[in-house]
Every structure is written in C-alpha cells, then in structure tokens.
Image (spheres, rainbow, N blue to C red):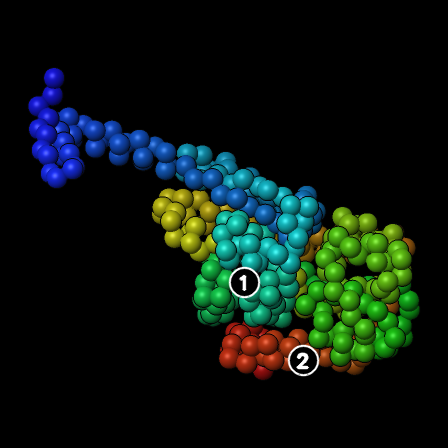
C-alpha cells in the first residue's frame, strides 16, 4: 500500500502520491523520454534521379550520417523525382513535408528567387564562407525558405549548350531550347525559344523534335541517356552548377547539438571534396562525349569572351530583376568583376 493522499475538489479528484513513488515515476518517465528522443530519423529527398551524378554526393552524405549518427540521427532516403517532382522539392522542404533536400537553386526559384544566383558564383565556397557571401545567402534561405543551407556538394562544374543542329555564331534564333531557370535569360538573349521541363522529360523531347537542344553541365548526360540524341556541345562553358543540401529550419532547431554536429561533419566533408571530384569528372565526361561522337562547336578569342560576358550579364540582369533588393548585394559577394 502507498501513502497516497486523496482530496476531493468539486467534481474533481486529486491524488497526491507518496513522495518517493512520485520521484521514481518522474525519473522513469524522463529516462524513457530521453531514450525515445535520442535517435531522430529525418526524411530526405533528391531533386535528381537516384545514383546519378547530381545525387551521388548526397547519397554519400547520407551514408556518412547514418554510419556516424547511430543512436543520434539517421536519414530515411525517400528517393528522387519518382517520389517527388523536382520543382516541388523547395516548397516541400519549406513546409516540412521533408526534412532534408538535395536540390539546386534553379529548382527552388518558386520559393526563393535569389537561389538561382548560385550559378553565377566566380568564387569557391571556401571563399564565400569567408567573405560574407554564404552568410548573406544563408539568411535569405532561413527567412524565405525556412531552410538551413548546410553545404554545397557540386562546384566547379560548368554548364554548356548542347544541340542537334550546328551553329556558327552565338545566335539561337529559330531554335527551341529546353531550359530550367538557370539558362532562361541567357538563351533568350541569344534569340532562342525556351521550353522548361524537368530533366526526366528531356530525352523524349529530343527524340520527338520538341526541342533542338538543351542546357546542362559538362557532366551527367550519360546518366540520363541524352548522349544518344545529342550531336553538338558548344564551348566554352559558362556559369557553374550548384547542388546543395538543405535542412528544414524547424527540424534543425529541434535537433540537439550532437545531432547537428553529425550532419555538419558529413556536409563539410562533402563540400570540401566537391571541387576536386568534379574537376576529375569534368575531364572524364569531356573525353567520353568526344568518344560518343558528340562534336564540339567552339567559339574562340573575342567570340568566346563575348559569349561568356553575355551569359553573366543576362544572368545578373535576371537575378536583379527578380530581386532588386538582394540581387546587387549578392553580386558583390559572388562576382570577381563588378
């Protein structure tokens, strides 16, 4: 028998337990809650097909977290576009449908227009983390997207124009080119008619003649089979691809310091490896494209300089038009030329 005391209060009934029993119950409850809360499982999605170039860095990040985070934090990898359309990933992360996303700024402009500015960086992430560029963008992600920008896993990876029809000058008048927001302003400035589609629809669009070409980085077309429907690559490249790991801020704020440390460590390692890894991949895929019969249309000298200058001018004009308040400030951090 316990020494519980019972008091009647109106229609209510209050039980005051024996002090020793109450303390024991509280301790047991706290221990149980601590045990249950010790390991957290986060839902993750990628905007790119699984096991392809732009998902592999993220998948390595997940492996590292799940190995190092046992008992603290684990990631449940839901998958790629078959699980969620790429252009819906940003809003899904913002609203907490998923906790972690591997995506690019080009796919999240519907939530945060400034995210597309990453393509225009002329400085490595290591420098942007020192000069204030990362901090400025991280603040925007928190405010506009309810997200923590954890790390950039793709860097030093130039974009190119790929075609099925030959051109001799940077004039795309009369050509239909598949785009994402990355290329819209630049390709329109060159006279193209642009068509926006997810990556999963590009092969069929090329096959059926819906488009005459597309924009894509130097790496990754073999993952998607696009090399089978591609005749030319235009050089030089322009901009640089960006694919990053984002975490829902509401989720992040609930994590313990130890859980956050596991995620940060895996993310920082991936970001540190990115530039060297993609430098090697760039060279490998350039050769592979040539071996596959993709011919190079190369602009040299003044023509190449003008082509790239137009790309950056159009890109920044587009960012500043979408975000007059933040665009010029981001340009100061990202650009080497003012």
Residue 55 in the figure: left or right of residue 44: right
- At which x and y percent is residue 118? 59, 66
**Mark number displayed over residue 313:** 2
**Mark number displayed over residue 125:** 1
Cα distance, mark 2 to mark 1?
A: 22 Å
Q: Residues within 10 Å of mark 2 (few under 14, many from 20)?
A: some
- At which x and y percent is residue 289? 83, 55
Q: Residue at x 69, y 78 (%)?
A: 314
First reached walking from the N terminus: tag 2 or tag 1: 1
- Image quadrant holding the C terminus, namely bottom right
Question: Foreground: 64 or 13?
Answer: 13
Residue 287 in the figure: left or right of residue 128: right
Q: Residues within 10 Å of mark 1 (few under 14, many from 20)?
A: many
- In front: label 2 or label 1: 2
Q: Measured along the vertical axis of the image, is residue 21 above or below residue 33?
A: above
Q: Residue at x 63, y 61 (%)?
A: 107
Q: Measured along the vertical axis of the image, is residue 184 above or below residue 32?
A: below
Q: Secondary structure at mark 2?
A: helix
Q: Measured along the vertical axis of the image, is residue 74 above or below residue 46?
A: above
| Residue 123 at least partly seen | no
| Residue 84 at least partly seen | yes
- At which x and y percent is residue 105? 60, 63
Q: Residue at x 57, y 58 (%)?
A: 90
Q: Secondary structure at mark 1?
A: helix
């Amino acid at each position: 028998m316990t020494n519980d005391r019972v008091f009647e209060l109106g229609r209510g009934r209050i039980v005051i337990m024996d002090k020793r029993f109450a303390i024991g119950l509280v301790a047991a409850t706290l221990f149980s809650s601590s045990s249950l809360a010790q390991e957290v499982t986060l839902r993750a999605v990628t905007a790119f097909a699984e096991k392809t170039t732009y998902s592999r860095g993220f998948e390595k990040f997940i492996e590292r977290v799940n190995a190092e985070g046992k008992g603290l934090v684990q990631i449940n990898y839901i998958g790629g576009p078959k699980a969620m359309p790429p252009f819906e990933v940003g809003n899904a992360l913002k609203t907490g449908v998923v906790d972690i996303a591997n995506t690019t700024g080009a796919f999240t402009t519907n939530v945060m227009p400034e995210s597309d500015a990453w393509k225009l960086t002329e400085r490595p992430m290591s420098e942007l983390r020192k000069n204030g560029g990362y901090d400025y963008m991280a603040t925007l992600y928190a405010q506009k997207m309810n997200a923590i920008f954890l790390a950039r896993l793709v860097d030093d990876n130039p974009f190119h124009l790929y075609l099925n029809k030959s051109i001799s000058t940077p004039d795309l008048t009369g050509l239909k080119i598949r785009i994402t927001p990355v290329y819209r302003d630049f390709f329109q400035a060159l006279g193209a008619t642009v068509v926006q589609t997810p990556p999963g629809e590009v092969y069929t669009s090329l096959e059926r003649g819906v488009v005459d070409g597309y924009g894509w980085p130097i790496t990754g077309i073999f993952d998607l089979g696009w090399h089978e429907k591609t005749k030319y690559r235009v050089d030089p490249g322009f901009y640089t691809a960006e694919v990053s790991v984002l975490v829902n801020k509401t989720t992040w704020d609930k994590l313990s310091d130890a859980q956050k440390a596991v995620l940060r460590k895996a993310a920082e390692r991936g970001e540190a490896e990115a530039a060297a890894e993609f430098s090697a991949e760039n060279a490998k895929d350039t050769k592979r494209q040539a071996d596959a019969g993709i011919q190079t249309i190369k602009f040299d000298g003044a023509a190449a300089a003008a082509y790239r200058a137009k790309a950056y001018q159009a890109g920044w004009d587009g960012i500043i038009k979408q975000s007059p308040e933040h665009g010029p400030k981001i340009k100061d951090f990202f650009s080497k030329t003012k």
